[in-house]
Amino acid sequence: MTRRSCAIYATVVAALIVVVVLIAGIALAGAQFFQTLIHERLKKEITLTEASQVFESWKNPPPPVYMEYYFFNVTNPEEFLAGGKAAVQQIGPYTYRNREYRPRENISFLENGTKIYALNPKSFVFVPEKSAGNPEVDIVRTVNIPYVAVMNELSSYAFLLRTLISMYIKSIGVEIFMTRTVHEVLWGFKDPLLTKLHSMKPEVDEYFGLMWKKNGTHEGEFVFHTGVENYLDYGKIDTWNGMRKMSWWSSNQSNMINGTDGAVFHPLINRNELLYIFAADLCRSIHLAYVKDVEVKGIQAYRFAPPSDVLMSPKDNPTNEGFCVPAGDCLGTGVLKVSVCREGAPIVVSFPHFYQADPMYINAIDGLSPNKEEHETYLDLQPTTGVPIRACKRAQLNIILKRVQGFPNTRHINETIFPIMFVNETATIDDDSASQMKTLLLIVTIVSNFPWLIVGISVLLLLIMVLFYRNRQKKNEVKRIDFNEAFHSLTTAKDETAYTQVSDKPDDSSQTATTQPKRNGSYIAMSPVEAQKC
């Protein structure tokens, strides 16, 4: 076998091997073999078990959680009590950070590791550099919630009794609106009205604050699914305070405890699904829908947010009828009465500035300007792992103010859902966790796309072989042409040499030895004998 034949044979064999690898790569890519393999691995790894890598980050979430409190300062209380429209001015934020980044406590595994019990206490530390002022100095005029709570409680009592109590309340200097420091309104103060009630009914706390006794406490006892049996159940709530469903709403669907607590979600999230969160402060579950793709610290994520139908009026979304308590007593779009699970004042929750709410609530108060950028609640989730990498939870606390017979100072007011304050709870993945996440996702991407990498390399090798073969053919053709031309030139030269004419003159032997050969045209004259020697 010649050298050229060996080279051709080796090239053909190499090409066949590359073609086989290419076909195998296409087959693996078409079957999504490696992608399926890595997804199955994720389903097994992302569980709430002590052996899983995500358990530690679930137990001790690394990113700090900031709570920004904004208050609505009432600028015209007298005008409102006289029947006019209330005007408010937003002040804040007053920012607090959760101490130790919200570690979970009292963790214990239940039912062969398929469920896990945990508490999630919250401890707050003031962050002055992220705040607009000093909460212990700044003053806010707002609705006196204890006063409204007492008035609401007495609304079913006899008119005479209400009148007498109203006169007594006025005598001790308590009014519908109060002026306190931000710190007092938020973290508590000794209220004169509650103090009087406490002397008669000791079970009534004489202190009031929106966050009174909530520093260092938790939102309830949770039991979560670990995801061992089904990855889609990862992080879902099994029971809250021992309940699998609530009892204060007017339908079974509304009383359901659905989804996670918002800290984790199952891996392999797709854009078409609805994600459910149980919000203890709202006393209900809500759902989130895909909004758009975003990027956070170089990590691709899906943004999910509550769609407008979450707090939509039952007239437009009949599934929300169960949140009307008593049945049929419904509010409009964008607000939810939660006093059924919070004893006392008629508390209503909404998004800040009544974002996504009926315009009648926005127009009833001067100074509100809802917008998506500042007032939307959303979660940015890494879809492969289901990990939240950025979160903004925004909720507003409101109270219903209306006329109550027997309380003369309410006789002119128009029923209004009055804004008190809203909170912006934010968390973003820290740099170290983001770096680890990007490394993990890079590995997942490489492994998942390994068949396509094989296809790409195989195609590249085939192209190189084709180009090499064509280049070799061109070189062989050039050599063949050069050889033919050389052979033709040599043959022509031989012919011309053999038949070159010589002079007709007789040979002069005496001159041959001493003179140069004669030329005939441009060729050297040679004798027929010399031509035969060649």
Image (cartoon, grey):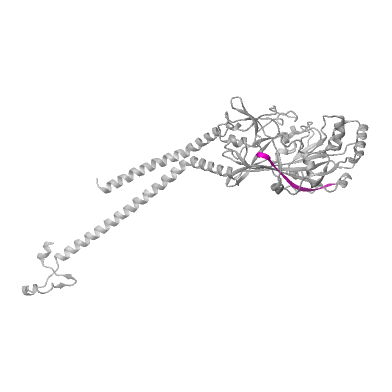
Q: Is residue 485 left or right of residue 192?
A: left
* 512 part of magenta stretch: no
* Residue located 93% across and 34% down the image: 164
Query: Is residue 97 rendered magenta in the image?
Result: yes
In which quadrant is the N terminus drawn? top left
Q: Residue at x 17, y 63 (%)?
A: 494
492 on left or right of 41: left
Residue that protrudes farthest toward the top in the picture: 111
Q: Quadrant of the C terminus?
A: bottom left
Q: Is residue 16 above or below residue 249?
A: below
Say above or below: 508 vs 472: below
Q: Position of residue 283 (x, y in %)?
A: 73, 33
Quadrant position of residue 309: top right
> Looking at the rendering, which quadrant does residue 517 occupy?
bottom left
Image position, residue 92 (x, y; %): 75, 47
The spot of residue 501 in percent (x, y) is 13, 69
